[in-house]
Image (tube, rainbow, N blue to C red):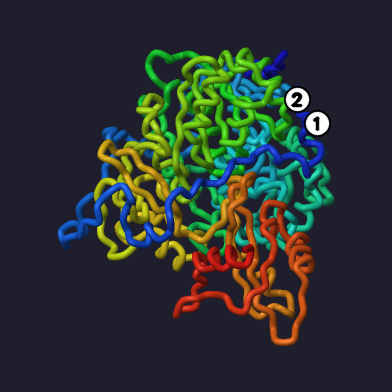
Amino acid sequence: SIRTITSKCAPAFITVRPCCACETMLNLLRLWKPGGRQIPMAAATLLRGRSPYSSNATTSPAEFERNVVDSHYGPMEIPKMSLPDYVFSPDIAQAADKPALSCGSSKRSYAFGMIHEMTRRMAHALLSQKGCAMQKGEVVGLLLPNIPEYVPAIYGSLMAGLTVTFANPLYTPEEICRQFENADVKLVITLPVLLPVAQIYKSKAKKYRGTVSIGGQHNVQDNIFGFQQLLMESHESQLPEIDPEDTAILPYSSGTTGMPKGVELTHSNLVANLVQGTHPEFAKYYRPEYAGITETILTIPPFFHIYGFNAILNMCLKTRNHLVSIPRFIPEDYIQCLVEFRPKFLFVVPSLMLFLATHPKVTPEHLASVDMILVGAAAASLQLQEKFRQKCGREVDIAQGYGMTESSPVTLCTPYKYDQSKVGTCGKLYPNTQAKIVSLTDGSNQGPHQTGELYVRGPQIMKGYLKNEKATRETVDDEGWLHTGDVAYYDQDGFFFIVDRTKELIKVKGNQVSPTELENLIQELPAVSDVAVAGIADEAAGEVPRAYIVLRKGAELSESAVVGHVKDRVVKYKQLAGGVRFVKEIPRNAAGKVLRHQLHLLGAQLDD
C-alpha cells in the first residue's frame, strides 16, 4: 500500500527515511543506461553537405536566408512568471489530496498539497535559519538521487529567489568541488551518506553558509541542518519578488566543445518549455478529455539531468499527474512498480525499452496498463518499437524527442500520434520554435532532405554559459540561433532526423563526457607530450572514451598507468573504457584543433 501524506497532516509529523536504495550511494544511479546514438551515415557524405536522399543542388545567394522552418503548431502564450508560480499555480488546491510523488522503492509518497506546503516552509527556512540564511541570487548545490524530497529541496530554493545547480551524486569529490566552486555554491542539500563530500567542498568554498541533510539532524557546530527539523520549525521571512529573467538553475554541460560549463537557464526558459510541452498534439494527458484525471507515470532518468528535471519532473507536477520514480534500477523492483502502480505512461531509454520487450520476467500483463511511452537519450529503432508492441500484444503510442541542456531541453518531439513510417525521426518543432539546417560547406540554409548543422531558436534557449562569454557567443549567435553541433535534415512534412554530430563531446549511456576534461587529466602525467580523447562505438554504452597519446622522447608509460590515473579522478562513465593508443602524432588543423574524425580513422587502423 502507498502511504500518502496529504496537506491535512501537520508538518510536525513529517518523517523521511531514506529508502534502502538510497543507503549506498555507489549503487544509486546505475539505473540510467541509455544507449548511444546510432550513426547511420558516412562522414564523407556529411562533409559534402548533402543528404544521400537528395541531389547535390547548388545554392543561390538568396537561399542563404530561406528555408527557416517554423513550428507547425501555432504560437502559444508564455506567461511572465517564475517557475514556482507557474508549477504551483492556484489550481493546485484542487489536487491537494491527490498523490504527486512516490518512491517506488520505499513506497514513500506525498500529495500535491503537502509538497506545496513543504516547499513553502523550505523557502522560508533557507532565508531565515540562523547560521545558514541565504540571500536572493545565491547558489544552492543539490547532491541527491531521485527521491520525493527533491521537489521541496529545489523548489524551496527557487521560491526563495536562489539559483540551483545539481550534480550527479556518483561524481568524485574532485568533480563535485570543481562544479560547485565554479558555480560559487553557498549551501549544499544532500543525504547523510554524502555529508563527507559536502564537508570537503566546505573547506574549499568562500563564505559557505551550511549544509542541509535530508534524513539527518541539526549539528550546529558543523553548520549542518536537518531537513525535517527545518520544516517543523517556525521561520518568518519575506519571500522575494522573482524576475522571470533571473537564472533559476545551473546544470552543467560540455555544450559542443570544451570543459563542462554552467548553463544559465532562467525561470522564463523553463516555463516556456513546459508551456510548449502542454500543447495537446504532444501532451496526450493534457488534452481536454483527460481534464481532472490523474494518471500514474513511471520514470527512471535522474532529476539532476535537465531531461529528468524539466521534461519529466516539472511537467508531471504542472499537469498534476502522479510521478513514481526509483533511485536505482533493479529489474525486480521495476517490475514490481508496474504491478503495484499500474502506470499509464513510461519514460524510458532504449536499453530499458529493450529490457521490457525481451526480458522473460516481463509479461504482457505487467504492461497492460501502459498506453504510451516516451523514449529519451537516443532513438528507438523501428525493430525495437515493434518488439515492444509485440510484447504488449497491442498498439502503444511511442513518442521520441530531441533536446539539449542549452534548450531547457526540448526543441523537437514526435506528436503522440504520428506516421510510424517516419523511422528514426526525433519529431517536429515545439510551438514557438524555429529551426534551420546550415550547410557544413558554405553556410547556406538547406532545404528538405539536405543535411547540415541544426540551428534552433525559441524562448527556451539559454541565457548563456556562466562566466564564459566566449563559449556563449560561439554557441548562440547574435540572432538567437543555438548551434546544436548535430547534423540533421528535415522532410517535406516537417519531421527532423539527426544523422551525425559535429560536436566533440562523447555520449556514454546518455551522459556527456568532455574530451577536454580527460585530456587535462592525462596531461598531468610527465611522460605525456600530447594527447587527444575521442569516443569509440560501444554496443552497450553507445560510445566510450579512448585516449590517443604521444610520449615525450625517451619516456615510457603503460596503458594501465594512464587508465588508473584517470580512474582515480572521475566518475565511472568518464573512465577510459575504450583504452589507450600510443601514436606518433595527434592530427590537428592549422589552428591546432584536434581533427577527431582522423582520430577515429587512426584508431581503426591501429585496431586492425
- The N terminus lies in which quarter of the figure? top right
Q: CA distance from mark 2 to mark 1?
A: 7 Å
Tag 2 near tag 1, CB within 8 Å: yes
Quick one: 531 or 16, which is closer to the camera?
A: 531
Considering the numbered disc 1 on the image, is that residue within a helix, a strand or a loop? helix
Please name the residue shown 28% across and 65% down the image.
442
Q: Tell me the amino acid under the disc marked 2.
A: Ser
Considering the numbered disc 2 on the image, is that residue within a helix, a strand or a loop? loop
Residue 43 in the image: above or below residue 586: above
Would you name the residue on which mark 2 appears?
Answer: 106
Residue 176 position within the rendered picture, expressed as x and y whole percent measured from the top left:
69, 55
Tell me which label, 2 or 1, sits earlier in the chain.
1
Instruction: Count residues near mark 2 (Cα–Cα under 10 Å), then give few for <14, some for 14-19, many for 20+.
Output: some
Instruction: Count residues near mark 1 (Cα–Cα under 10 Å), then give few for <14, some for 14-19, many for 20+.
Output: few
- The C terminus lies in which quarter of the figure? bottom right
Q: Is residue 131 left or right of residue 500?
A: right
Residue 591 position within the rendered picture, expressed as x and y whole percent measured from the top left:
45, 78
Would you name the residue on which mark 1 appears?
Answer: 20
Residue 415 visible to an observer of this rendering: yes
Residue 265 visible to an observer of this rendering: no
Residue 118's image quarter?
top right
Q: How many numbered circles does the render carry?
A: 2
Residue 602 in the image: above or below residue 289: below
Residue 411 position within the rendered picture, expressed as x and y whole percent measured from the top left:
40, 42
